[in-house]
Image (spheres, rainbow, N blue to C red):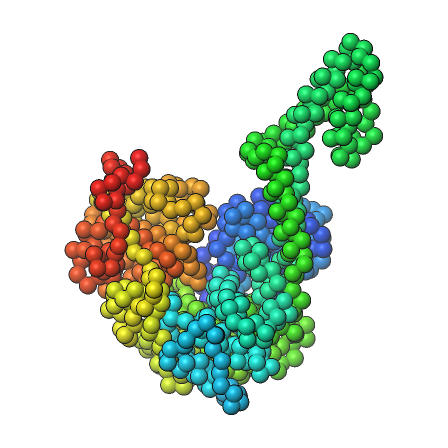
């Protein structure tokens, strides 16, 4: 499509979706209540939520019943979120809004609503859509050979991938996990730009995926002296948008200062709590000495005997401001004991729940002091005008920037020389296409054999209205992934409608595509299995420590819902008896009903470790436990809806689950059923040639491995 047509078509598609949301109730909303909040000054608030968030993009603040649009981040933003404590930092930029919150204390809630994202996208295409076109300018580089990380020996494919990026206006690097997309290809390409004084952007579809790619980049930089000499992370890298607390803690120098300030405030409150508990635990000893002193007063003991005890009590209590002028005497003991007892009572629950000795609490408090000092010391100094690497989601880009070379007033121009989009297969084409308004080279990295972006309008409905003049005719464009951008830029809208209706793969003519086909994460057997069921491009495994695959064999009685309680119980026993206390793990399943059962069985992990496969995109864990759920006895029209690799969706679900695991994949399923299924990826994963350790589980025996009960 030509630029003017892109502007018109995408603006109309957004307007149709807004009408669909308003009149058809088609765009779902998720409401998160704010249970409490406090002001920490300067328009910043800490919100306590009733449930965890997966993503802050598209999050809308409600004051009572009234939605407050973010207005592209000019009203408010969310600098960081801690999933474990359900704490969200809110930065209110509009003083009127912060004034209302501080003076009226309204009930707050948060709504994840695509309506506001659609409005922002509509406005961006309406304003800048006619700038979107195929980049004409190719990368410009000298004759100096490209330098790869010193600890790695690049393969010919990886060399070709870097060369493709550095010589093409559009490129796509396709590879499974472990093929070197980030730490070899992306890092090398970025460092080549920086060595020549360039500036780049790293875009990823979710906050988690932004942080994942930055972690990989930082690992590559820190391992190579030449790369380390090229970049000062505090000055040169800026991660925009809502950071997780883990990322702020690990890489505060990369984050915006507002997120660090909010985290420091929360840690300071935690430090005060520990100090309160230390003080309260000291009250027990003080009360004992006061009882002794009371007895001494009762018998008129001489002052030479009472003075040492008085000094011992005052030495402890005088550390608190309220006791600094305290004087002791016979008539003061009773009121003082009552005051100390009230203080103990007010903190009793906290003291009991902590369950720590004074020594342990002092150690924790000291750790927090050091952590706060560290965060304050390493706070980065980069801003969008000085940073050489800008990392964010497409939503943040749309909200904060105007295209390169455009005067945006308060919104800065996106002044970069190359744009890299990681996890491109999971990024929406509608969001990725706006990046082409900058007229600089664009590189996609990813794996389009994993799950595509989630769009809340059913594909069946979209295909029914696609190609027919009228309402929602162009809405299908929102269901395409970023790898279709060239097709959108080069083909007619009629061709695109036909491609979508026929579920055709993208066609790359102007885009330079390189496949990375050797993964160090997979062993030979798993590589062959993935090539057979997923990639069909000769992918192989070469890892010295390949992914370990474990199976837990579980039988489930007949059922009509996608719920498998025996599998949930097997997962629970495996987590409690096999995994180490510090193991990093996640429990995945394709179905929301099975999620509910898993959370019921393991409430301690409900907020942090149990999610659907669809929501795991852009994240990785050492151990992934996959509750397949489907098997013999499921009475559904499509019994293996998200688990059969014979369907495109099932194949992508299973491949995504495998790809989330870094060290170990645990398949929890009816093994005998799946082994009886021909030409299925699950059967291959749990077969003797690929699967290592095999457990079995039943309610009677518990978890058993090699005829040995793990624990009952």
Horizontal side, residue 304 vs residue 127: left or right: right
Q: In this view, does 582 lie above or below 308?
A: below
> Nearest the camera: 693 or 646?
693
Horizontal side, residue 682 vs residue 14: left or right: left
Q: In the picture, which quadrant includes the N terminus?
A: bottom left
> Nearest the camera: 415 or 593?
415
> Nearest the camera: 24 or 437?
437
Residue at 26% across, 46% down = 695
Residue 47 visible in this rendered orientation of the protein: yes
Q: In which quarter of the image is residue 249?
A: bottom right
Q: Is residue 569 above or below residue 62?
A: above
Horizontal side, residue 300 vs residue 602: left or right: right
Farthest-out residue, top? 299
Residue at 36% across, 67% down = 520
Residue at 60% across, 49% down = 47
Q: In the picture, which quadrant includes the C terminus?
A: top left
Residue 302, image x and y in percent?
Answer: 82, 14
Residue 13 visible in this rendered orientation of the protein: no
Q: Is residue 470 above or below residue 659?
A: below
């Amino acid at each position: 499509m030509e630029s003017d047509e892109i502007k018109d078509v995408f603006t109309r598609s957004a307007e149709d979706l807004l009408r669909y949301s308003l009149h058809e109730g088609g765009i779902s909303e998720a409401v998160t209540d704010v249970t409490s909040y406090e002001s920490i000054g300067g328009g910043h608030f800490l919100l306590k939520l009733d449930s965890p968030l997966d993503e802050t993009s598209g999050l809308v603040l409600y004051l009572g019943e009234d939605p407050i649009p973010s207005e592209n981040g000019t009203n408010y933003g969310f600098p960081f979120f801690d999933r474990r404590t359900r704490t969200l930092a809110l930065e209110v930029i509009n003083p009127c809004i912060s004034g209302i919150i501080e003076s009226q204390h309204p009930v707050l809630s948060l709504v994840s609503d695509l309506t506001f994202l659609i409005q922002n996208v509509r406005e961006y295409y309406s304003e800048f859509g006619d700038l979107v076109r195929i980049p004409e300018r190719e990368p410009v580089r000298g004759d100096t050979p490209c330098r790869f990380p010193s600890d790695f020996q690049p393969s010919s494919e990886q060399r070709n991938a870097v060369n493709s990026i550095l010589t093409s206006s559009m490129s796509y690097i396709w590879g499974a996990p472990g093929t070197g997309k980030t730490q070899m290809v992306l890092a090398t390409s970025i460092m080549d730009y920086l060595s020549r004084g360039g500036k780049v952007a790293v875009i990823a579809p979710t906050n988690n995926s932004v942080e994942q790619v930055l972690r990989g980049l930082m690992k590559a930089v820190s391992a190579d002296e030449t790369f380390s000499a090229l970049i000062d992370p505090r000055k040169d890298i800026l991660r925009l948008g809502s950071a997780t607390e883990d990322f702020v803690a690990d890489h505060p120098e990369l984050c915006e200062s507002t997120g660090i300030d909010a985290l420091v405030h929360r840690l300071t409150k935690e430090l005060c709590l520990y100090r309160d508990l230390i003080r309260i635990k000291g009250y027990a000893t003080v009360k004992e000495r006061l009882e002794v002193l009371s007895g001494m007063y009762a018998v008129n003991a001489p002052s030479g005997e009472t003075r040492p005890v008085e000094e011992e009590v005052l030495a402890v209590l005088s550390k608190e401001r309220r006791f600094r002028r305290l004087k002791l005497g016979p008539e003061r003991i009773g009121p003082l004991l009552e005051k100390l007892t009230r203080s103990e009572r007010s903190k009793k629950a906290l003291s009991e729940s902590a369950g720590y000795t004074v020594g342990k609490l002092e150690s924790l408090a000291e750790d927090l002091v050091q952590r706060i000092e560290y965060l304050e010391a390493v706070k980065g100094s980069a801003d969008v005008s000085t940073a050489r690497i800008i990392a964010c989601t497409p939503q943040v880009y749309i909200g904060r920037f105007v295209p390169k070379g455009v005067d945006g007033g308060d919104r800065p121009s996106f002044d970069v020389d190359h744009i890299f989009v990681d996890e491109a297969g999971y990024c929406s084409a509608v969001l990725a296409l706006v990046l082409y308004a900058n007229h600089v080279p664009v590189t996609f990295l990813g794996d389009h054999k994993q799950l595509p972006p989630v769009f809340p309008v059913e594909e069946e409905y979209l295909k029914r209205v696609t190609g027919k003049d009228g309402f929602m005719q162009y809405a299908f464009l929102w269901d395409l992934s970023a790898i279709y951008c060239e097709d959108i830029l080069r083909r007619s809208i009629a061709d695109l409608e036909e491609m979508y209706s026929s579920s055709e793969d993208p066609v790359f003519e102007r885009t330079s595509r390189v496949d990375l086909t050797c993964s160090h994460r997979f062993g030979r057997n798993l590589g062959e299995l993935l090539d057979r069921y997923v990639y069909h491009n000769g992918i192989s495994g070469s890892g010295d420590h390949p992914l370990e695959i474990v199976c837990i064999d579980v039988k489930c009685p007949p059922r009509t819902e996608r719920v498998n309680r025996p599998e949930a119980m097997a997962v629970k026993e495996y987590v409690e008896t096999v995994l180490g206390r510090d193991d990093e793990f996640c429990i995945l399943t394709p179905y929301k009903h099975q999620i509910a059962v898993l959370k019921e069985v393991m409430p301690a992990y409900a907020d942090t470790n149990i999610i659907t496969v669809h929501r795991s995109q852009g994240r990785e864990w050492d151990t992934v436990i996959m509750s397949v759920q489907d098997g013999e006895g499921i009475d559904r029209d499509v019994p293996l809806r998200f688990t059969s690799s014979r369907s495109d969706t099932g194949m992508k679900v299973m491949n995504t689950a495998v790809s989330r695991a870094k060290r170990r994949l645990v398949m929890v399923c009816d093994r005998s059923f799946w082994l009886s299924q021909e030409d299925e990826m699950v059967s291959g994963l749990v077969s003797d040639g690929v699967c290592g350790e095999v457990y079995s589980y039943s309610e009677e025996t518990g978890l058993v491995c090699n005829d040995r009960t793990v624990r009952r």
